Amino acid sequence: MGYKLKTYYNKEDLPPLDDVNFCHYSSSFDLYEKVPCHRPLMIVAFDDEKPVACMFALIKRLHRFLFGPLFKQCYVSQKPSFFSDDIPQEEIFHQLVKTLLQEVRRKVFFIQFRNLDDPIFGYKAFRDQGFYSIKWISIKNSLQRKRKIWDQLSPSRKNQVNKAKRKGVIVEELSSEEKLPEVYRCIKKERGSKFFRYFPPYQCLVNFYRHYVCQNKGKIFITKYGQKIIGGIILGFEKNKVYCLYYWRKKKKYKKLYPSIYSIWSALQFAENEGYLYFDFMDAGRIHKKKGRALFLLQFGGKQKATRRWNRFTSCLINVIANWIHN
């Protein structure tokens, strides 16, 4: 069966689409509204005139003073949204990947698919289009178990949560835009000059609050000690699942108050109390690398699962070399 694919660069032009997968909501366009150096697009697959699948992608310029395809990258997170279980998802995905490559190959230098969860999904489509894979880990907490979240924590995590409680650390839901500048300053200061720990511009945080938090598609929790914000966590919601989009803490002065641990614990407890079935930390790091972020997150009782990131350079020569190195 032939499917017609069309690319959209403006939300206003989109046909009516159901919200299925979090990263492919039509409101993803709102998230990057008035955000410099970011250009969103969505590819929609039609069966006759009926949408059957959609895939959101983001073209990001590395720096506002750097121009041209060499300084642009394209990212896709999660599997596309499929609006029916009775359609050939692999076949449609193959067409979506091919269309995306044709659309952006002269506009960007690098393309990446991440957070796909299933390491096998789309394997043929990616190989046919010249992508190479890097093994990765995703970590997910099941909230359906008979054991409560508290009982799933490691002994050290329980001690740290109890210490933070005794010292007066609290978590509050952000309920107005007034504190967003302070939250953003805290995040930027925590990031420092680390290039690979990218966080979007301030306008993106404002858009998330207006189009996700205010529409019950997400939450921002801030961790406080006295009147100071010392950490926090940003969550996204998808049917029966909660996504941990970002968490942060002040490292040095408040290290002994365990702000990141208390933020994550509070978010897990919130998800459990609200009846969600899963809490997904998404990509947690390279596979077989049990240290750093992956080991930190596993101590909250989640299970790791092997997945892949699929990458491709639009330069044929560089892509051939990258495929040779990784394969």
Image (cartoon, rainbow, N blue to C red):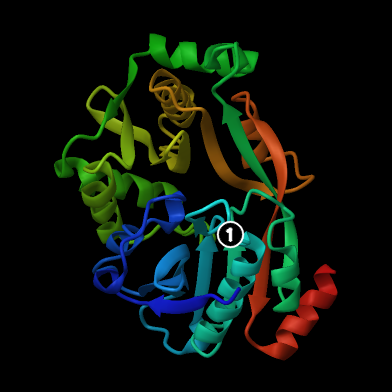
Badge 1 local density, few (<14 within 10 Å), some, or many (20+)? some
Q: Where is residue 67 in the image (x, y as percent from the top left)?
A: 42, 87
Quarter of the rendering occupied by the C terminus: bottom right
In this rendering, position of residue 129 left or right of residue 27: right
Residue 240 versus residue 185: which sits nearer the camera?
Answer: 240
Q: Where is residue 8 in the image (x, y as percent from the top left)?
A: 37, 76
Against 224, residue 156 (above or below) is above
Residue located beneath label 1 in the image: 87
Quarter residue 269 falls in: top left
For image coordinates 44% across by 50% down, the residue present is: 20
Residue 188 is situated, as x and y percent measured from the top left of the image, at 37, 52
Residue 192 seen in the current view: no
**Residue 315, image x, y percentages:** 66, 88
Question: Which residue shows up at 16% across the image and 39% down it?
Answer: 176
Q: Disc 1 residue type? A: Ile
Relative vertical location of residue 256 with respect to residue 6 in this rendering, above or below? above
Residue 171 versus residue 169: which sits nearer the camera? 171
In the figure, is residue 229 to the left or right of 158?
left
Please state, as top left, top right, bottom left or bottom right, where the N terminus lies in the image: bottom right
Figure check: 298 above or below 281: above
The residue at the point 49 percent across, 56 percent down is: 81
In this rendering, does residue 110 appear at all? yes
Front residue (pair 303, 325):
303
